[in-house]
């Protein structure tokens, strides 16, 4: 791939860590944003550094549920030496997935709602604005992680799915407004890794899938890498969902 740098938000665990791994293995330098997974991300980069002789990257901590955290992340990325000639990729992966209605105290629900919109909309928008110049200099691209809830309603997950829909739509806007220097696409994972609280529903979903199994984190990492390295593809949303969209 050469010497390009990518920022992956929420890159310390789960799908984010698989994405970082796939990109570093392909030659990218990864700025791995975390909120709490600092040790996991540092261990991941150490393992990757043992196997690869290019600059594998660094860990940057920030709470993206606060405006100060978003700004601090943007500043840290712009100050990184590997970004002096531009940024090659920005992956909006950090997320939360929980109900904002139904059971739970009103205060908890209000906080959940704020965090969902902050993480899925406000933080990606502000980060993209702050990093757009660096992306343009690096002929870079944006990949937003959305999901398969588009056009559907899931119980008590209205703010989750509406905020992901906003990110999806915002990504299409970036594809137009930031062209021709910056591309923007989205990956819509299906049932890949379940959250602790949705295990039963996750297994029911997987049983109904045409491909009859959950996806692997590497399936998502490959899709992200495809978009980052596909110079004539912009404004697309790719479902990686074992055929969930069909049923
Ligand atoms: N898992 C699936 O099957 C699935 C299905 C559909 C869509 N997706 C999408 O694919 C992406 C990756 O999925 P995932 O399940 O791996 O995600 P995840 O585990 O739910 O979240 C990814 C990371 O987001 C970070 N994060 C949470 N709150 C934060 C905050 N306030 N500030 C900064 N970072 C914060 C966490 O970082 P720390 O760990 O460092 O705290 C977490 O590791 C997400 O965008 C998700 O919506 C996943």
Image: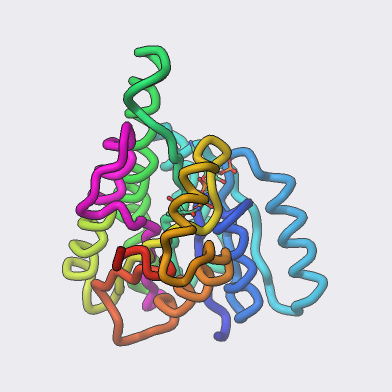
Looking at the image, residue 26 lies above or below residue 21: below
The location of residue 210, given as percent across then percent down, is 41, 70
- Which residues, given as a range, are shown in magenta? 138-166
Quarter of the image with the N terminus is bottom right
The location of residue 101, given as percent across then percent down, is 32, 25
The part of the image, by quadrant, that contains residue 150 is bottom left
Observer-nearest of 231 and 111? 111
Q: Is residue 21 magenta?
A: no
The location of residue 79, given as percent across then percent down, is 52, 56
Residue drawn at the location 39% of the way across and 41% of the way down = 119
Residue 117 appears in the rendering: no
Q: Is residue 195 left or right of residue 137?
A: right
Q: Is residue 154 magenta?
A: yes
Q: Is residue 52 left or right of residue 190?
A: right
Residue 115 appears in the rendering: yes
Most distant residue in the right direction: 50
Residue drawn at the location 50% of the way across and 40% of the way down = 198
The tally of labels here is 0
């Amino acid at each position: 791939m050469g010497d390009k740098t990518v920022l992956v938000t929420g890159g310390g665990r789960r799908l984010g860590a698989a994405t970082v791994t796939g990109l570093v293995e392909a030659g990218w330098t990864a700025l791995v944003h975390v909120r709490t997974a600092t040790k996991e991300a540092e261990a991941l980069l150490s393992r990757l550094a043992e196997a690869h002789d290019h600059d594998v990257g660094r860990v940057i901590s920030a709470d993206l549920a606060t405006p100060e955290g978003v700004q601090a992340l943007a500043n840290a990325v712009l100050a990184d030496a590997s970004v002096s000639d531009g940024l090659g990729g920005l992956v909006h992966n950090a997320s939360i997935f929980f109900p904002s209605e139904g059971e739970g105290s009103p205060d908890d629900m209000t906080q959940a709602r704020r965090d969902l919109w902050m993480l899925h909309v406000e933080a990606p928008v502000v980060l993209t604005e702050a990093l757009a110049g660096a992306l343009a200099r690096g002929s870079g691209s944006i990949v937003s992680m959305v999901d398969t809830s588009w056009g559907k309603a899931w119980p008590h997950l209205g703010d989750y799915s509406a905020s992901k829909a906003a990110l999806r739509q915002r990504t299409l806007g970036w594809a137009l407004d930031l062209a021709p220097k910056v591309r923007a696409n989205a990956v819509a994972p299906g049932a890949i890794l379940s959250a602790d609280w949705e295990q039963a529903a996750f297994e029911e979903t997987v049983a109904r899938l045409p491909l009859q199994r959950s996806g692997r984190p590497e399936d998502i990492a490959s899709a992200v890498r495809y978009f980052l390295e596909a110079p004539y593809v912009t404004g697309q949303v790719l479902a990686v969902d074992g055929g969930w969209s069909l049923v």
